[in-house]
Structure formats: structure tokens, C-alpha cells
């Protein structure tokens, strides 16, 4: 009788283990199927992301080309009539930061305003520093300004690089151009 109980217990344990193994195997198969489906969806999403990135790149290229064309039109218009775009203010900070070697950079802010009836683009803001008539700028600041809408005012930040031996009482001259046409000039002693 003890043998029968032992055999029965072992049989029950073997059946329980077999059923458990079958359930675990079934769950593993289900998980592998879900993983395969998720990987397939992930691959599809990565493909969509690549397509969207390609579209974004194409649109950015088109946008750059349109801005360039708009800048060319602005330069053409500046040759035909005066564009009412002005430098409102120019100020510099009294400190400098090391640029490298014996060069330092003096930061500045220039505020420009488009008082014209048209949006302009492709403008160039050039800032130089002078000591008397001597240009002290080793690397003057040249900043392109795109898409300045009618009535818009924008603060442009930059820096002019000079020799560390340059005088401290420099005069700043900001020049705003459309192509070769000077739209405005501002001097800060």
C-alpha cells in the first residue's frame, strides 16, 4: 500500500511537472510570438522614422534654397529703392573673454528693426572696432540675418576679436547691408 501511494504520488508529481512544463513552454512560445510582432512593428516604425527624417532633410534643403532666393530678391530690391531697415541700438559689454593666444573677444548686442513694408532676408550685419582711424578688429563679426518680417525688431548677439594689446577705449561700428548696399550704420564711441 505504501508502494501504491508512493507510485501515485510520483505519478501525480510527473503529471504536474509535465503540465507545468507544457504551460511554461506555451507561455514562452506566446512571448516569442509577441516579441517577433513587436520587432516587426519596431522595424516598421524605424522605417517610418527614416522616411520622415529624409522628408525633413528635403524640406530643410528647400527652405534654405527659398531663403537664399528671398535674400537675392531683397538684395535686388535694395538696388532699386531704399529699404527701411535700421540699427536701433548697439552696446557692448565692458569685459572680454579669451579667444586664444593673444586674442580676446569683446561681446556686443545690436538691435535692428525692419520698418519697411516688406519682409527682408539675406542681410549682413558687420561689426568692427576702431581706435581712432585704425581698425583693431582681427576677426570682425559678420552675421547673416534671415527672414526679418515687417515691423519686427531683433537683438543680434556677437563678438569682435581683437589683440590683447588693443586699447580699451574702442569705437564700435555696426554696418547693416543688403548685398553691397549699406542700409544703416551705427557708431558707438
Image (cartoon, rainbow, N blue to C red):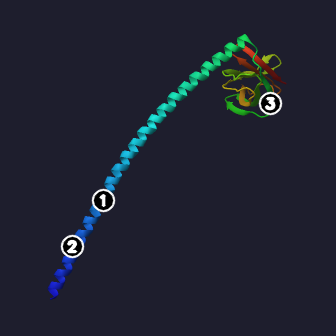
Residue 157 shown left or right of residue 26 in the figure: right
Q: Which mark is residue 28?
A: 1
Res 83 → quadrant? top right
Q: CA distance from mark 1 to mark 2?
A: 20 Å
Q: CA distance from mark 2 to mark 3?
A: 88 Å
Q: Which residue sits at x=28%, y=61%?
A: 26
Mark 2, residue position: 15
Q: Mark 1 or 2 closer to N-term?
A: 2
Of 34 and 182, nearer the camera is 34
Question: Are the two marked residues, 3 and 1, in contact with CB atoms closer than 8 angstroms?
Answer: no
Q: Which residue sits at x=51%, y=30%?
A: 57
| Residue 145 percent coordinates (x, y) | 68, 25
Mark 3, residue position: 91
Q: Mark 2 or 3 closer to N-term?
A: 2
Question: Are the two marked residues, 2 and 3, in contact with CB atoms closer than 8 angstroms?
Answer: no
Of 115 and 162, nearer the camera is 115
Quarter holding the N terminus is bottom left
Secondary structure beneath label 3: strand
Give the residue at the far front of this rendering. Answer: 117
Quarter holding the C terminus is top right
| Residue 29 percent coordinates (x, y) | 29, 57
Q: Mark 3 or 1 closer to N-term?
A: 1
18 versus 73 height, above or below: below
Q: Which mark is residue 131?
A: none
Q: Which residue sits at x=72%, y=31%?
A: 157
Amino acid at each position: 500500500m505504501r508502494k501504491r501511494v508512493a507510485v501515485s504520488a510520483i505519478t501525480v508529481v510527473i503529471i504536474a511537472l509535465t503540465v507545468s512544463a507544457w504551460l511554461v513552454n506555451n507561455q514562452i512560445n506566446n512571448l516569442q510570438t509577441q516579441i517577433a510582432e513587436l520587432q516587426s512593428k519596431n522595424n516598421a516604425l524605424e522605417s517610418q522614422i527614416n522616411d520622415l527624417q529624409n522628408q525633413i532633410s528635403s524640406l530643410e534643403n528647400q527652405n534654405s534654397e527659398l531663403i537664399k532666393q528671398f535674400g537675392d530678391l531683397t538684395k535686388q530690391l535694395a538696388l532699386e529703392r531704399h529699404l527701411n531697415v535700421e540699427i536701433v541700438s548697439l552696446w557692448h559689454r565692458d569685459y572680454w573673454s579669451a579667444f586664444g593666444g593673444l586674442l580676446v573677444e569683446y561681446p556686443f548686442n545690436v538691435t535692428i528693426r525692419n520698418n519697411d513694408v516688406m519682409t527682408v532676408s539675406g542681410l549682413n550685419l558687420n561689426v568692427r572696432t576702431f581706435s581712432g582711424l585704425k581698425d583693431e578688429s582681427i576677426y570682425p563679426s559678420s552675421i547673416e540675418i534671415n527672414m526679418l518680417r515687417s515691423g519686427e525688431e531683433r537683438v543680434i548677439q556677437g563678438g569682435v576679436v581683437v589683440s590683447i594689446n588693443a586699447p580699451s577705449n574702442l569705437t564700435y561700428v555696426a554696418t547693416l547691408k543688403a548685398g553691397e548696399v549699406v542700409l544703416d550704420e551705427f557708431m558707438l564711441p
